[in-house]
Image (tube, rainbow, N blue to C red):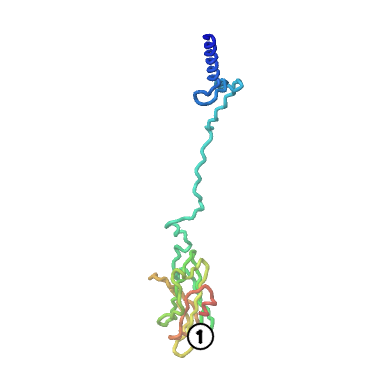
Amino acid sequence: MSTVRTAAVVLAAVSAFALSACGPSEDGAADTGSATPPPGATASGTPSTPAAPPKAPSASSTPPAPSAPSASAPASGPSASATDADYDVFPCSTYDVTFSAHLAEPTTSSYLLKITNKSGKACRALGHPVVTFGDLDGQATQRGEAPGIEDALRLGPGESAYAGLLGGAHDGTGKTVGSIALTMDTESDLEQKPLTASTPGLYVSPTANSVTPWVDNAEDALSL
């Protein structure tokens, strides 16, 4: 009877050992029985080739330079107004222009007045011409509305402006003169030298004479 019990105990011990050999490991995973390959070796036992270390950046390479602001960018602020083409265009004076007068219609003593910019810079023909008649007192009456200074006619070098002068019909109340004199409206007290033009037989009515503002063509000057 003791022999049978001893054999049973031995058999139980062998079974327990067999179960512990193939059972789960301490971390809960089944033991496959294969040994972990040593570092540097593949699963088949062959040593693996070490990977090449990453290349260091080339000492000769330089970082890209930051891009400069575009030279074509528009200017801003107060300096931009200095580039305006009309920023320094002043009123024309008699020192800037030449002057001529041509008979357009004899019965009304109508004359076409013309000025031409002889200077090397632009100027503005402001308002109406200031016209006096020979040795007669007073000046021609203004006819028609002139634009403001901002919209006044701009004359580049060699460009011309025109005005229409009307002496008036022969009503027996006026006088005949042989010349007229012109100065320019400068909206200032600038002293000017009057420019003269011959106007033989110009009849000047004290109540009907008039002159138009400066315009950019002869047709408009005579039709205003």
Asked if residue 29 is positioned above or below residue 126 in the image, the reply reads: above
Q: x and y percent of residue 174 in the render?
A: 44, 87
The answer to whether residue 44 is left or right of residue 16 is right
Q: Position of residue 102 (x, y in %)?
A: 53, 78
Q: For the view shown, which residue lies furthest in the left direction? A: 189
Residue at screen point 48% across, 65% down: 122
- Label 1: few (<14), some or many (≥20) within 10 Å? some
Q: Nearer the viewer, residue 108 or 95?
A: 108
Give coordinates of residue 32: x percent, y percent: 57, 23
| Secondary-structure class at tag 1 | helix
Figure check: 180 above or below 10:
below
Residue furthest front in the image: 1
Residue 87: name its quadrant.
bottom left
Could you say where residue 38 lies in the image, as x and y percent from the top left? Answer: 55, 20
- Picture layout, residue 172 above or below residue 81: below
Q: Can you tell which quarter of the image residue 188 is in?
A: bottom left
Query: What type is the residue that disc 1 sits on?
Result: Thr
Q: How many marks?
A: 1
Vertical placement of 74 versus 123: above or below?
above
- Which residue is under mark 1? 108
